[in-house]
Image (tube, grey):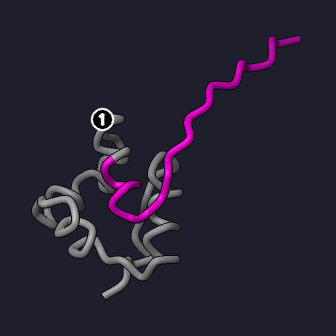
Amino acid sequence: MPFNSTRKTGRRLRPVMIAMMDENVSVADLADRLGLSRQSVNRWFQIDDLKFTNLEDMVDALGYDLEWQMIKKEAAQ
């Protein structure tokens, strides 16, 4: 079963959710690839927060590379 696109997901994990839909990967499939329970992975989406290393593992399990960049906020004028 593919990832449920109607699920509420915060902005932090939205790119992962989109990749899961594109790859037709369910939470259970992703959990299996990571060697974790479906409940553990589902919790990450519910709280929309996780360790950077867990994000790297999720992205890798989906067959993607993770590029990280920091952009300076514009000074208030």
Above or below for 2 versus 76:
below
The magenta stretch spans residue 44: no
Name the side, left or right, on which 75 lies relative to 56.
right
Q: Nearer the viewer, residue 72 or 33?
A: 33
Rendered image quadrant of residue 29: bottom left
Rendered image quadrant of residue 71: top right
The magenta stretch spans residue 62: yes
* Residue 7 % position (x, y): 40, 70
Above or below for 6 versus 56:
below
Name the side, left or right, on which 71 lies relative to 10.
right
Name the side, left or right, on which 3 lies relative to 41.
right
Q: Nearer the viewer, residue 63 or 37?
A: 63
Q: Which residue is mark 1?
A: 51
Secondary structure under the numbered disc 1 in the rendered image: loop
* Residue 76 % position (x, y): 82, 13
Number of other residues with Cα within 10 Å of mark 1, as a class: few under 14, some 14 to 19, many 20 or more: few
Rendered image quadrant of residue 8: bottom left
Above or below for 51 versus 62:
above
Q: Which residues are magenta?
A: 57-77
Q: How many marks?
A: 1
Give, as a three-letter code, the residue at label 1. Answer: Lys
The quadrant of the picture occupied by the C terminus is: top right
Residue at screen point 10% across, 63% down: 37
Residue at screen point 43% across, 64% down: 63
Residue at screen point 12% across, 60% down: 35
Main secondary structure of the magenta stretch: loop
Q: Nearer the viewer, residue 39 or 22?
A: 22
Residue at screen point 30% across, 35% down: 51
